Amino acid sequence: MACEPTTGPVNGTALEVLRHLDTGPRGLTEAEATARLATHGENTPPHPRTPSALRRCLRGLRDPFTTVLLTLGVVSAFVASWGTATVILALVAVSCALRAAGERRADRSLAALRELVTGTATVLRRTDDTAAPRAYEVPVADLVPGDVVRLGPGDLVPADVRLLRSRGLTLGESALTGESAPVPKAATDPPEAPADSHLCFQGGAVVTGSATAVVVATGERTRFAAARRTLRPREPSAFDRSVHGIARVLVRFMLLTPPLVLMAGAALRGQGLQTLPFAVSVAVGLTPEMLPVIVTTCLARSAALLARTRRVVVRRLPALHDLGAIDVLCVDKTGTLTQDRPVAARSLGPDGDDDPEVLRWAAVGAWWTLHLTETPAPDPLDEALLEVAGAVGEEYDGLAALPLAPGRRLATAVVAGRLGHDLLITKGAAEDVLERCDLPAAERQRLLALAAREAGTGLRVLAVATAERPRPRRGPARGTPFARAHACTPADERGLTFRGLVTFRDELAPGAAESLRSLAALGIDVHVLTGDHPATAARVCRELGLEPGEVRVAGGDDAAAPGGSRAVRAGADDVRGRADGVWGGAVGPVGAGAFPVGSTTVVARCTPEDKARVVAGLRAAGHTVGFLGDGVNDVAALLAADVGIAPRGAVAVARESADVVLAEKDLTAIGHAVTAGRGGSANIAAYLRVTLSSNLGNVLAMLAAGLLLPFLPMLPVQVLAQNLCFDAAQLAFAHDRPGPRELRRPTVLRPPAFLRFITGFGVLNAFADLATFGVLALALNGPDALDDEAVFHSAWFTENLLTQALVMLLLRGGRHLASDQGQGPADGAGQVRRPGPVGWAAAFLAAVGLAVPPSPLGAALGLTALPAPYHLLLAAVLGLYALALTVARSRHARRRPWSRTR
């Protein structure tokens, strides 16, 4: 989206803008800034208001299961079945209250942790009107119109500003305009200034240069805030899509159940309307009404644990599930796999042999370039040279320097040489330096080939040349320094003598290799999307033990088209220097071939659009993709990924676009976050497996019993009480700790497979219930028969809770067709973990099933105590059911090998 030109006083001269804002080049006083902050408000993007507790509860009614429950409760009240209606509405109220409480705790935790990732800006302020201005670091939220701010490389523009002074300023505005190329900016006055060239907008990032500017708009009045209001909402996450797919099928079945029961009652007993409470209770029995509570609690607990122990902030709770499901992680090279500084590797003479003099000359040039130029930040290669060369350069007198600049891939320093002469030391991209050397064509081609050979191994290449010039004798006095007597210009960089090459390698980030191994053990493939030279990226990957496949180069006219790319081929005829601090490299001519989304490890020369396209392609291929980025140029890819990840030190717009914020740019922290996400997802999947398979079995059994028995198999209030006990026990899944094998592969809910799973095990559960019916029917016709209906209801109430306790234990863990939790072959199938919260909850559920019928509460529910022989009969049925469930679980595991399928 292009930015429309700003109108009004900001398009006037700098003096007119300062007057309009009632400020000056020295900035505001503290009192003025405080008053304006009260008037204009904080410089923060608009955030939605925190909902009240009532609004949170009402929002919970939008859940499809809760909506169906509420409808069934209203229907029960309409037919004057007050007991059924009371229990159903109580379930709805408890579910909404627990969900609202969990969301409130999660929101408060995230709001407190967001303070860890707030940005700052450098602002000029005075204590009073007579005091001199001083530079302060203040929170971006405290900026007000009229503040004078300073900008340097890497800074995020904190508000809409008008430039007052600038030096070599270029700005990345891809977050606003979608254009990846840096935009030059200058503090010129209209009408000489091109449109908006004197304005910088919030969300832009300084690429090169420095500037001083005055703030003209903050908060909701900035162009960035206006652009945010036009953004499309994020697509539903993979987790949301899976749960909604399952919910749609279950809701249809729930809505179909009451009419079936009513028709059966009317046809068999002529009591259609009288069976409505029972029909409603059966539909309620199928509902996983605790699902929203379990989901919110699982994810909120995992997010809080990550924040407390790993300082990882999850800004969007469903993203934690998606983070656990990722199987591809896209990262940049610099700052993630390597440190943000190169290291000098070798210095080669023209013959290709080691020559330490080349390193010394390059270091002398770096020393005086740093001391004689006003660069906003030292060049990383200069720092690397001085670090390895030690104390050099001070033995010369520095006279002048020409630094690196946009579009210029050379840096030259001039020092005093022998009497009456000056010495030029030029370093830069091999192609550019050799072009300025006095060499035969064949020798120049040989040296280009030498540079290409070194660059082809993944090293950065810096060429060094020198020249001796007679000292000019113009100026006000004899012996005037060169810098005053004769300004050094690019025209002086001719007829140079080639000295040699210095090569650099990237310093690997500590722990990067171990982090990559940990991610590989979690089943995550790492793809490197970098703007660096392809050979450099491939070399780093190999040093870390990450063997790249075919390395591809994104960009270029052919890569801009769908499926376009450029194949890498190092060649002596195409040595490309770069103006972004990497002085030389080799990349070959354009080649054909489909863009290898999902099959390559390294994609080099990536623009922001390339990164977003690769991420989108991986998602289209069926992968769940995480993207780690920290710059404005990463925003598009952060939004395109299933999970956007940014470090705390990232630019503000990247942090705001990310779903997860790390304390440091560290792959180890991502591994811990993935494990936490998989733990929460495994618990949610276990809850759904256990609850839905058990509920479906009970519903099928009740429908069959309603057709076969002369009375209702269970009273409506008994069905609801049983369901309430089971729901309470299921809350333990939110506090369970999955086994190690369940954390090794992503947990992905697949609705078709999940529904097949719960249908199969639900039918098995129904057979167990029907077997109980048969045993009870035979027993109730014997000489010891009591009140048939009361005994039948009590026995089935107990049997249902005991079978549900067994299901909680036996279907709690392990990989199933419904949820792909991978494990290695050595782990074995069907292993039951040691008891934890779920084990204790299952014991509680079994105790309730045995204790309630003979208790006063049981009498109120219409239950009665069971004689000992009935317990023995139930024990026999339950033993056979447990055996059948174990066999079915083992057979199911053998049918599906322990492998990850995508």
Image (tube, rainbow, N blue to C red):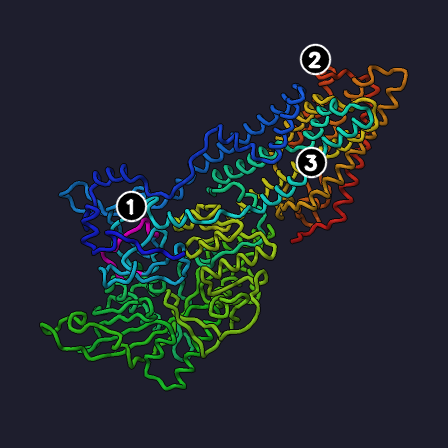
Q: Earlier in the sequence, mark 3 or mark 1?
A: 1
Q: CA distance from mark 3 to mark 2?
A: 30 Å
Instruction: Identify which residue is drawn at 67% across, 40% down.
Output: 249
Residue carrying label 2: 856
Other-residue count near label 3 (Cα within 10 Å), few / some / many at <14 / 14–19 / ≥20? many
Instruction: Identify which residue is drawn at 38% across, 57% down.
Output: 2
Callout 2 amino acid: Pro
Residue carrying label 1: 137
The chief SS type of the magenta part is: strand
Callout 3 amino acid: Leu
Q: Quarter-wise, where is residue 254 in the image?
A: top right
Q: Residue furthest left?
A: 477
Callout 1 amino acid: Glu
In the image, 734 versus 638, the foreground residue is: 638
In the image, 791 versus 461, the foreground residue is: 791
Q: CA distance from mark 3 to mark 1?
A: 56 Å
Q: Position of residue 287 (x, y in %)?
A: 66, 32
Element on which disc 3 rests: helix
Q: Position of residue 623 (x, y in %)?
A: 59, 54
Instruction: Identify which residue is drawn at 79% across, 40% down.
Output: 887
Q: Earlier in the sequence, mark 3 or mark 2?
A: 3
Residue 782 on the magenta segment = no
Residue 168 on the magenta segment = yes
- Give the magenta part as a residue range: 156-169
Q: Position of residue 89 (x, y in %)?
A: 61, 24
Which numbered dot is residue 692?
3
Element on which disc 2 rests: helix
Image position of 155 (left or right of 569): left
